[in-house]
Amino acid sequence: MKHALRDAGLSALIALGLFTPLIGLVTESGDHGLELRARPIAVVVVVSLVFLGRLLMLTRAARIAVPTLAGPSPAMLRAGRAVAPMLLVFAVLLPFGGSRYYVDLATLVLTYIMLGWGLNVVVGLAGLLDLGYVAFYAVGAYSYALIAEHFSLGFWTCLPLAGILAAFWGVLLGFPVLRLRGDYLAIVTLAFGEIIRIVLINWVSLTHGPNGITGIPRPTLFGLAFSMDGGEGTFAGFFNIEPETIQRVIFLYYVILGLALLTNWFTLRLRRTPLGRAWEALREDETACRSLGINVTNTKLTAFAIGAMFGGFAGAFFATRQAFISPESFTFIESATVLAIVVLGGLGSQLGVALAAIIMVGGLELLRSFLSFLADQMGSELFAGIANELPLYRMLVFGVALVVVMVLRPRGMVSTRTPTATLAPLGGSA
Amino acid sequence: MAYALQQLINGITLGMIYGLIAVGYTMVYGIIGMINFAHGDIFMIGAFLSLISLLGLASLGITAVPIALALTLLFAAALAALYGWTVERIAYRPLRGSFRLAPLISAIGMSITLQNFVQVSQGARVKPMDALIPGGFQIMESDGFAVRLSGMQIMISITTIIILAIFTWLVTQTPLGRRMRACEQDLRMASLLGIDTDRTISITFVIGAALAAVAGLLFLLYYGVIDFFIGFIAGVKAFTAAVLGGIGSLPGAVLGGLLIGLIEVFWSAYFSVEYKDVAAFSILIVALIFLPSGILGRAEVEKV
């Protein structure tokens, strides 16, 4: 106990040093340039939190069994098997029960789930750290927007094109770089993501620069448009119902649900092919792969291209849903969010990624709306303040979560994906 | 000609700042073989610490520029070193021997954390600051274009050279430097020979962070404006510098930094300012493809 107290005190002292200038002294613009404003209470609060947290960690660490890497128990596995079908049923039925707000939120969550599943092929299965995934998302979105603008093609024609173009860029970037060590790939993809964004901002004649592209056409249902006039050839006109915006919202929801499920199905099937096995082997040990005669570069390249293709699909959907895109939507923050979802969900686990996206994107948004609802009802300044600040803290939470997950459970918080095919343990039956 | 000379001066000044950051990348990579993504953000924190220190000293009445700068340098370097130590202790040390991607993901998480921590605590707005060191010399004039060497540029060059000289002495002449070089050559062998490798790695992070903080102070003085995002771009560029010079090689990092600074400045001057970051990032990709071991680096031998 005495030892723990000393250790916690030391941690608090370090925290005091770390946080006194950056939290305790805020630079604000005043009358004569920048001025400092002291915030002693905030420092005291943070430092005491560090002290208490460290103390708790040290005194209770022995008692809380950190979940081991051995995997979940059989009972949990059985329960886990029921989660996926339940989620699917819930997702299919959602538009019938939810208001427009929930359908919109679910569409957003599904977009992230699809991006997560796409990135999961690259990071989770093949073990390549891609920090510029948003670049392929951007390529997909801009491909659709530009093709639709210049050649007036519809969404369903452009969707495969967007995927192919994104995959093409994946190959183009991956081909020279994938021969290098894994860490280099991470930083090159990071740089590539920035390059794409800078080009999108500055190539004004093609992309309209920071103003973005407006009036991107909406998708149709077998040629039936979702327009408000309700005439011949529109969804409402064909079925003889009142045209309403919610119809298009729900349609878009089912489009992304279908796309996400397609991604999932495709990945699950791929994992069983020799290629999928090679990906997983690559993730575990690259040198062993090479000595077993697997063409490492080609294997990586296919993972990269397929991941990029799904990113492109998601991008095309994003463009058609928003009807407006600008380089603002494709910053590093998006890449980081998707990566956080994949890592938290458990590298390689499909269900884990879905759950992580629901919690990290949907959960935070619901929390925010709940807090602002409380603030409205009770007229409370405090809740309103927290609700407004919440989006600011989102990335902070993601960053901390990435570190914590890696330190505690490097294979993921929600679930674990071990290689599909493993060697039977020596002397035992498989 | 005069115009090119001016760009040369500007490029070298900028390159020195990149070189200081690149040394931190290359040292950490040399010892534990990982890219410390959070290093660019330590640089950003160093810049913020410098700004806070300068403002604090001004409000205390210490306005003599040399004293204020010296105190700020010490303050920022010491606290950034503490940040570097903490980052290593929390996010990297528990992961030694973990699976391949774990330290990388942890590092990127740390980078996001630091960036957003500063955004939340100090605000997202850019922070402007008045120039502290006015004046300068006019070196030559031709075709109506005056080549200037500003006091700030002289100060940046002198500071960088002094700091790098101290650092070189530290690495090549002291027992600490010998331990660091031993760890760089073979971590396991070094620990068998009685070197406290954990401690040495910690010290490496501390020194790298202190150098990054110096770069942060110089960046703040040179540009006079910072925000929470500067670490991202500067980090990637400094890493490019480290790769270009040969990762693991300390003189290479400085050389790479100078090259990147020159390329960026000349590109902005003769081609387009908008694409200067693209130019620097493209060099990273080109260097990795055609010159993966860098200008002064050794070819990497993969040990199993």
Image (cartoon, coloured by chain):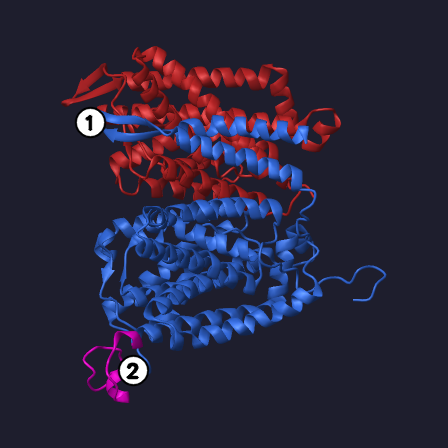
Chain colours: A blue, B red
Provide the chain ID for the residue under circle 2.
A
Provide the chain ID for the residue under circle 1.
A
Q: Position of residue B22 (x, y in %)?
A: 46, 30
Q: Position of residue B257 (x, y in %)?
A: 42, 29
The region drawn magenta spans A223-247
Badge 2 amino acid: Gly
Q: Is residue A347 above or below residue B83?
A: below
Q: The residue tagged with tag 1: helix, strand or loop?
A: loop
Q: Position of residue B193 (x, y in %)?
A: 74, 25
Give a yes or no on whether discs 1 and 2 share a subunit: yes
Is A227 one of the magenta-colored residues?
yes
Badge 1 amino acid: Asp
Q: Which residue does the image show at 43% across and 27% down from the upper left?
A: A20
Q: Which residue does the image show at 42% across and 49% down from the upper left?
A: A394
Dividing the picture into quarters, in which one does residue B202 lie? top right
Left or right for B201, reference A89: right
- Residue labelled with disc 1: A31
Q: Position of residue A155 (x, y in %)?
A: 32, 73
* Camera-side residue of B177 and B93: B93
